[in-house]
Structures are given as C-alpha cells and as structure tokens.
Amino acid sequence: MRIAFAEAEAAAQRGEVPVGAVVADASGNVIARAGNRTLELKDPTAHAEMLVIREAAKVLGSERLTGCDLHVTLEPCAMCAGAISFARIRRLYFAAGDEKMGAVEHGACFFGLDTCHHAPDVYSGLGEEQAKALLRDFFRKRR
Amino acid sequence: MRIAFAEAEAAAQRGEVPVGAVVADASGNVIARAGNRTLELKDPTAHAEMLVIREAAKVLGSERLTGCDLHVTLEPCAMCAGAISFARIRRLYFAAGDEKMGAVEHGACFFGLDTCHHAPDVYSGLGEEQAKALLRDFFRKRR
C-alpha cells in the first residue's frame, strides 16, 4: 500500500485525481504499479486500477491474474470493480471508502451481486486517513 | 448497429465471445468500431465497449465523448457501464439483454444508482434475436 500511495502522490503532481494502485503476486512481489492518468492519456478508462490490471496481465501473459492481490488508495468504482472481478483478483485492499463513486461498499456493492461471478476477499480502511487527506488537499488546491 | 454486428461476427471468427460495438458522433458518423479481444490481447478489460470508447477518445482527443452514441450487440456489464458513464455517452443502444452479467437492466442497474453521475439514454432490443443467435451458435460450437 506504501507504493500505491507513492503512485497516488505522483498522480497529484501530474494534476490527476490522486489514486494509486499496485498488483502483487501470490508471494507478495509487486508486478505492476500505476496512478490515475485519465487526463494525460485522454482516456476515460485510465483509472489506476485499470492501468495496473492491464499492466499485470501483460507481465504475466494472461488475462487472468489468479492468486494476485490489488492494493488501491480509494474504493474502486463500478468500472474497476468489474475489471477486478474479470481479472480474478484474489484479495482487494483499499484505503479510503468512496461514498460518491464507490461500488464495493457503496452504490452497486458489485461483489455481492448475482451478476458478479468472481469476488475477491476485501480488506478496507488501512491508510484511510492518509488517502482522504491526499484527496482533500488535491481538491482544495484546485478550487 | 449493423457494423456492431459485423464486429461481433469478426470476434467470433477469432474465437472471442461475439460482442461488437460502435461509437458514432452526434451527426451519426462512425468514429470507432471494435469487437471483443480479451483473449487475443490477454487483457481482461478488452471488452468491445471498452476498446471502442478508448479508440473514440483517441480520435476525438478527449476523455469525454459528449454527444456521442454507443451501439453494442450485448447489454454492457458493470465495467463497461462505468466506462460509458465516465465517457459521457449520450445514447446507448444495445441488442440483447444479458441476465448473467448485464449491469444496465440487470444486476447493478448502474445508471439508476446515486453513484452514477452521468447516465445515457438507453434503447434496447433492436436486433435482439440476431445477437442472441450469434452468442448461442458460438457457445454451442465451443462445447
């Protein structure tokens, strides 16, 4: 999660909403890391989770990341929750909850739906205050 | 939608689940077309809708496809519904509903949630039988 925060801070430096993510393999080795790049890439799908899943799939040469864990600084949205499910992520760790767009513990609560065919184990709250402060500072400076 | 079906048929020829999608601008000009390529690209996010949205964003040079319409042969899943919302798609047309994974008229019913901040107008059912037949034939041959 430390690396995910470094990626979130780097995203903020680029003027992107500060969210960072990491994929680690079953042994805990980091195989991909990414920050949000929607503005830079002009790509509405370029959330940190999407980029890190695509990168990890490339590294492993498989569209399934079975046994891998994803660490992200903010609760995933519906798009990212869907991708996490398709990628067969084993464990999802996220820092801050996202009442506005989250789809894990808010909104769709996607992993509990019948239309979700693989759900990771979910661990939330680790680093919550740090993640919230990062987002708060970012949006305060933009006003 | 005719082009979306051609993309779905091409996907089936490649051994991919046959789903195809098109993005058209406000005047109805096709600006991007794509079929599902999750296996070929080894990318769990490479659904037809995701690829076509990313391509259209590249063509327009913007992460927002304001005024554009998306035509797809199957009801979008949660991942794709999220991307459609972020991309500010104006109208979504889909052929067959998807009880198993759909997130528009099934499951999350994402566009009706408070955590969805832009919802397209949705038109479903046009070409439904053709889309269902395509999927049925594909899965029958794979057994």
Image (tube, coloured by chain):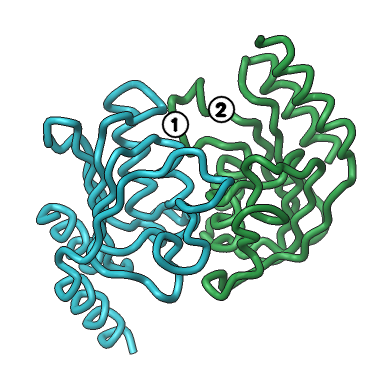
Chain colours: A cyan, B green
Crowding near pointer 1: few (<14 within 10 Å), some, many (20+)? many
Taking A70 as reference, is B56 left or right?
A: right
Residue that numbered label 2 is attached to? B37
Asked if badge 2 and badge 1 are on a common chain, one would say: yes
Q: Which residue is drawn at 32% across and 66% down?
A: A16
Which residue type carries mark 1? Asp
Q: Where is residue B10 in the image (x, y as percent from the top left)?
A: 71, 21
Q: Residue at x 33, y 31 (%)?
A: A65
What is the secondary structure assignment of the residue under circle 1? loop
Above-or-below relation of A3 to A124: above
Above-or-below relation of B4 to B41: below
Taking A91 as reference, is B75 left or right?
A: right
Count of residue discs: 2
What is the secondary structure assignment of the residue under circle 2? loop
Q: Position of residue B35 (x, y in %)?
A: 65, 31
User: Where, by quadrant of the figure, is residue A104 drawn?
Assistant: bottom left
Residue that numbered label 1 is attached to? B43
Which residue type carries mark 2? Arg
Q: Do the residues labelled 2 and 1 touch (CB within 8 Å)?
A: yes
Task: Say whether disc 2 or disc 1 marks the residue closer to the N-terminus.
Answer: 2
Q: Position of residue B112 (x, y in %)?
A: 65, 69
Crowding near pointer 2: few (<14 within 10 Å), some, many (20+)? many
The N terminus of chain B: image quadrant: top right
User: Where, by quadrant of the figure, is residue B138 drawn?
Assistant: top right
User: Where, by quadrant of the figure, is residue B120 drawn?
Assistant: bottom right
Q: Which residue is drawn at 75% across and 51% down?
A: B24
User: Which chain is home to disc 2?
Assistant: B
